[in-house]
Image (cartoon, coloured by chain):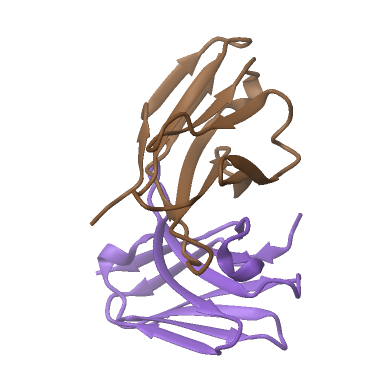
Amino acid sequence: DQQVKQNSPSLSVQEGRISILNCDYTNSMFDYFLWYKKYPAEGPTFLISISSIKDKNEDGRFTVFLNKSAKHLSLHIVPSQPGDSAVYFCAASPYGGTGKLIFGQGTTLQVKP
Amino acid sequence: EPEVTQTPSHQVTQMGQEVILRCVPISNHLYFYWYRQILGQKVEFLVSFYNNEISEKSEIFDDQFSVERPDGSNFTLKIRSTKLEDSAMYFCASIPDRDGGTQYFGPGTRLLVL
């Protein structure tokens, strides 16, 4: 089941630069998308979400962009900080987010000081 | 800030034994979920629960699994006869209502089946 894909297993950026994490999906029924940050042996921590009626949502250093025609979303972190180093998961859901979440495989972000 | 809690944090059990994983969702939340993550793999949906019944379950959630909300606060996942492949991190999540789209996750229970 590859409905949500994060094709880059890892990403390394310099502190202060932009981090761009990408996610692709295949199911047109998805209408709510989320990004979670996760450390080993901890639960996913919610970062930011976007509804399919929007193409951009911003929260501080985090911005999520949604391109419905391409079935693609991205998370931008500006500026990146060493504390951002973690695994980032995108997730998608039908029914406005109350249904099950389908997760991508995750991208490990390393922000170097 | 309210958060989802889970107990125990770690559980080691012998194959064939029953385990119960416990979750205390955020109070006033109405929708509850269990997910699991096998080491090195994706986070996978197991089951959703609303109004004291299962809303949706995955293929993983077979007859060996059950969920219950025994009182107003706890939400439990029971595995009746554990298998080696049940070893994983199990996460509970909750959302407040039909209008809420963000699932908030607990810290997880690491289950190891020997």
Residue pictured at 24% horizontal, 69% vertical: A113
* Quarter of the rendering containing residue A52: bottom right
Q: Position of residue B111 (x, y in %)?
A: 49, 26
Colour of chain B, in one word, is brown
* Quarter of the rendering containing residue B39: top right
Residue pictured at 46% horizontal, 17% vertical: B12
Q: Position of residue A86 (x, y in %)?
A: 38, 58
Relative to residue B101, is residue B108 drawn left or right?
Answer: left
Front residue of A33/B69: it is: B69
A59 vs A30: above or below: below
Tally of marks: 0
Relative to residue A50, is residue B84 drawn left or right?
Answer: right
> Which part of the image, by quadrant, shows the C terminus of chain B?
top right
Relative to residue A50, is residue A40 drawn left or right?
Answer: left
Q: Position of residue A7 (x, y in %)?
A: 64, 67
Relative to residue A15, is residue B43 drawn left or right?
Answer: right
> Which part of the image, by quadrant, shows the N terminus of chain B?
bottom left
Q: Where is residue B76 in the image (x, y as percent from the top left)?
A: 49, 31
* Quarter of the rendering containing residue B53: top right
On the question of residue B42 being in view, the answer is no
Front residue of B82/B76: it is: B76
Front residue of B73/A88: it is: B73
B112 vs B47: above or below: above
On the question of residue B69 being in view, the answer is yes
Colour of chain A, in one word, is purple
